[in-house]
Amino acid sequence: MAGGPKALPSTGPHSLRDMPHPLAGSSSEEAVGGDSTPSPDLLMARSFGDKDLILPNGGTPAGTSSPASSSSLLNRLQLDDDIDGETRDLFVIVDDPKKHVCTMETYITYRITTKSTRVEFDLPEYSVRRRYQDFDWLRSKLEESQPTHLIPPLPEKFVVKGVVDRFSEEFVETRRKALDKFLKRITDHPVLSFNEHFNVFLTAKDLNAYKKQGIALLTRMGESVKHVTGGYKLRTRPLEFAAIGDYLDTFALKLGTIDRIAQRIIKEEIEYLVELREYGPVYSTWSALEGELAEPLEGVSACIGNCSTALEELTDDMTEDFLPVLREYILYSDSMKSVLKKRDQVQAEYEAKLEAVALRKEDRPKVPADVEKCQDRMECFNADLKADMERWQNNKRQDFRQLLMGMADKNIQYYEKCLMAWESIIPLLQEKQEAK
Amino acid sequence: MEQAPRDPERQLQPAPLEPLGCPDAGLGAAVGKEAAGAGEEDSGVDTMTHNNFWLKKIEISVSEAEKRTGRNAMNMQETYTAYLIETRSVEHTDGQSVLTDSLWRRYSEFELLRNYLLVYYPHIVVPPLPEKRAEFVWHKLSADNMDPDFVERRRIGLENFLLRIASHPILCRDKIFYLFLTQEGNWKETVNETGFQLKRRFTDLKHYSDELQSVISHLLRVRARVADRLYGVYKVHGNYGRVFSEWSAIEKEMGDGLQSAGHHMDVYASSIDDILEDEEHYADQLKEYLFYAEALRAVCRKHELMQYDLEMAAQDLASKKQQCEELATGTVRTFSLKGMTTKLFGQETPEQREARIKVLEEQINEGEQQLKSKNLEGREFVKNAWADIERFKEQKNRDLKEALISYAVMQISMCKKWGLTVLPRLILNSWAQAVLPPWPPKLLRL
């Protein structure tokens, strides 16, 4: 199945089953034994085959590099780690944003397509339209009904009108991607994906009617946690949860810093772009004065123009793909910290009640039912949270790998575009003037 | 390069100005005499009077247009339109006009006349010609140069052109213009003999050096700003280094990958210094030609000075010759102090006159010698200057191409370094290994 380097596959993760081993390269005797993973340099040398990717310093200007070489490699590395792909029985997609103009307001709806073989779904396929506030409603319902679980974040609700155009293509697309991610995260969750509200969200023709009914289908857990009275102060957080709390604090802090730096970079790049857009045309002006140099100078002007466009695309990608994910994870961390706090409260209540019982020094050997309930609650919460944390860590790794590699890939594409532009004018500069 | 001189007075001189009424003028001697008769003191000085005479006395019309065929410079058949120019002098006694000259000219000759005027009267707003090709055509209007309507409109435009020149106080006195109206054959050769095309070359060169200087300094200014901004972009990336490193400290599986990313950012940020230093070499190469433009200008200036010197000498000579002739014939047309005093204080004696004539003749001889040598000098200068300018052009084209190539090569190696080497290696070495879980063996393909 591994042939030569293929044409650029479409972006997005591919199932491992559909792809040749990404590092298999062009030669077929890739004896990558099943016992050990080859060393990176070996892999790299093999995978690029006869394409001289590892260039000596100051390689010849003659274009030997194929523009597809680096980024197609990375595309192949965008793996879908979904090992349980075989067992997935629920697929949800958010797409097709549409603008609705009504007398009172203007808003966007998105199409939600669901395919499932689960018994909880009457039909194998559903297609509904939802707007942001429906998503918001879903999220609160999930928080309410599944308080022991980590609920994925939604993209920011409020945008300052006048600063951001709520109906611009870029904004809508960024939002759509985030909403899609939101639903996919829920879909992947073994507990949340079976939530009744989620089911209704995906399937109901008229969601508003359902909302109005105020059917609070709380799970047992939800019900019980709901009644946890606040006011109990936890003395010490257990080590493992303290570690999680510390981790999330630092994590959110670092992401915040990265976000600020990224914004600064974008700002600097935009200012650089402004100057580039003036720089290129001066070569054109010069070209108009010259005879033999006219074509080369015009070529340089066009080349700089192409590089400017490539940079603009890179900057847009950073804004549209990189920044939103950072912000998403910051929001995620915040909501996770509140869940931790809730867990603390459950534990605090339990410990307080336990203490109260101990202090009463009654000779009832049996622990009262309500204390038992508290313990139960706490242990379930701890278990759910631990499981969710592990799942979250795995997903986070995947998301950030994809994010960082994606950004690196975009950068590579930028350099490839610039490279092509500059290489194309070398022959122009070297050519001898024929007698005109 | 340039033709052998025929007439020192015509070679490398400004537009030969012939005061009206001069024996050489030939245009309606009657007219000249009229002008002279009007007042001896002021003829030759009062341009307004001449102007009015010119307009009053002469009528110019482009009366007909005719399609012709002929062979062009490359010996190919071509079709063109010829226009009939008629000049009439009006007898101011009875208002009747008499045809004095008529000849046929084609559009390219009008162009030649105008180009000549542009070079020799750079300070004058020279009237424009009607359009060469039909532009600004609306839907139904024909764009064909042979179209009768176009030709008709052009005829009117050409007539207008000639009338504007004739009514211009300075341009109307130009000899080449006069010849255009009167000398059908050989006129082109006459114009070319003025060497105006050569003069234009120097004028063009001066413009070129001015514009080169302007464009290169603009380029250098913007490049500096670009470099400044690029520096900013690279340096801000350096801020990533620390935060990625700190982040990596709290991560387990991702730690190495993030550490690598941070390190990469530091390397990236520090690479800008070398990049910009290399670019400075390119800037220096451009600067050299910025200063070269100044040197070009110096050559043009020298040429201008020599020209001016030559013109002054020629004018001086012409004026002396005239004086001499007037003294000899007894007619006084040019204004001279002696003439004035003669009027006021009585005629001079024949002996006095003879003496003056002798002096003038000596001066004229000297002047002619000087003019000859100045001309020679001028021609030598032009020949050598132009040869060197051609050499300079070749050198400039070579050098600048080299500079652009090395600039491009610089950019290319930078793109290759980051895009094809560092980044992919970073991804494969750090992230593919560190961030991914180990390859599930069952999914490895062979």
Image (cartoon, rainbow, N blue to C red):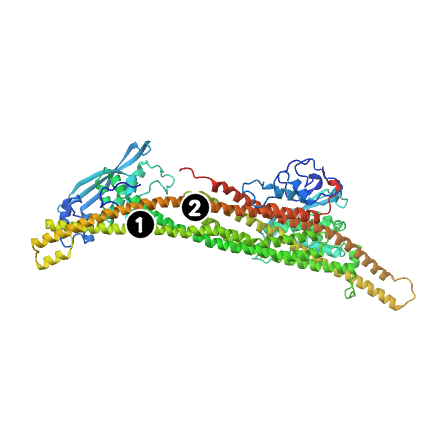
Q: Residues within 10 Å of mark 1 (few under 14, many from 20)?
A: some
Q: Which quarter shows the C terminus of chain A? A: top left
Locate residue A355: give its quadrant: bottom right
Q: For the residue marked with disc 1, what is the amino acid?
A: His
Same chain for the residues under marks 2 and 1 in the image: no
Locate residue B151: give its quadrant: top left
Say what secondary structure mark 2 lies in: helix
Q: Residues within 10 Å of mark 2 (few under 14, many from 20)?
A: many
Q: For the residue marked with disc 2, what is the amino acid?
A: Ser
User: Residue A20: percent from the left, percent from the top?
Assistant: 69, 38
Q: Is residue B110 visible?
A: yes
Q: Looking at the rendered structure, which numbered label has been put on residue A177?
A: none
Image mark 2: chain: A
User: Residue B23: percent from the left, percent from the top?
Assistant: 15, 45
- Which residue in the protein does label 2 denote? A287
Image mark 1: chain: B
Q: CA distance from mark 2 to mark 1?
A: 27 Å
